[in-house]
Amino acid sequence: MGFLAITEAVGGLAGFLTRKGVKAFKSVPKSSLTPPDTVFPIVWSALFALMGIGAARVYQAPPSTERTRSLILFFLQLAVNFGWSLLFFNLQAFGFAFLWLILLWILILLMILSFRKVDKAAAWLQIPYLLWVGFAGYLNCITWLLNR
């Protein structure tokens, strides 16, 4: 339950801190594949829930070096995820945010590979997150290209 609360709190705080940036982003040229605004909080809430459940499953596994590594990767990617929102929406540093998102995608992949060694179900729960961040990378890149 603690991991679920932590991930949802991080997502909620990012949403709160970027609310003005999100409003400003509405007028920015973007990909025609950008989903409606109402989709993002729904998808992110579900993804943060899956992240939290996966991390809790890993935490409940017997102590090991791989469990520790998995949890470090979990918290590292969560921090990078949080930072992306600020870079993209508040600073509108679309190029740097795209590079940051590539880092996030790599960290998610490493987390999945590490989770898999501890709890396969926890790893599978992260696949939608990896896919969504890949799609977000496409959207971020197009936004950057359209606004250079």
Image (cartoon, helix red, strand yellow):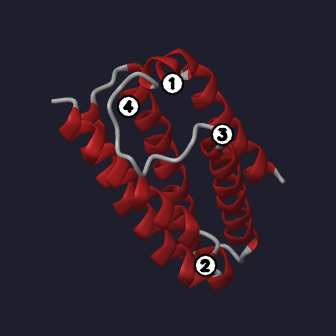
Is residue 95 something that shows in the picture? no
The three-letter amino acid code for the residue at tag 1 is: Val
Q: Is residue 83 above or below residue 33?
A: above
Which tag, 3 or 4, sits closer to the chain's start? 3
Q: Residue at horizontal 38%, vertical 31%?
A: 88
Q: Are marks 2 and 1 in contact (CB under 8 Å)?
A: no
The CA span between labels 3 and 2 is: 26 Å
Please tell me how crowded label 1 is: few (under 14), some (14-19), or many (20+) other residues with Cα within 10 Å: some
Task: Name the mark nearer the viewer: 3 or 4.
Answer: 3
Q: Are marks 1 and 3 in contact (CB under 8 Å)?
A: no
**Residue 118 or 20: which is nearer the viewer?**
20
> Which quarter of the picture shows residue 120?
bottom right
Please tell me how crowded label 3 is: few (under 14), some (14-19), or many (20+) other residues with Cα within 10 Å: few
Q: Residue at horizontal 33%, vertical 54%?
A: 138
Please tell me how crowded label 4 is: few (under 14), some (14-19), or many (20+) other residues with Cα within 10 Å: many
Is residue 141 toward the left or the right of residue 111 in the image? left
Task: Name the mark nearer the viewer: 4 or 2.
Answer: 4
The CA span between labels 3 and 4 is: 18 Å
Instruction: Find disc 4 in the rendering and name its residue.
Output: 88
> Which quarter of the picture shows residue 36?
top right
SS at mark 3 in the image:
loop
Q: Residue at horizontal 37%, vertical 29%?
A: 87
The CA span between labels 4 and 2 is: 28 Å
**Image mark for residue 38:** 3
Is residue 21 something that shows in the picture? yes
Task: Name the mark nearer the viewer: 1 or 3.
Answer: 3
Instruction: Find disc 1 in the rendering and name its residue.
Output: 22
Instruction: Find disc 2 in the rendering and name its residue.
Output: 124
SS at mark 2 in the image:
helix
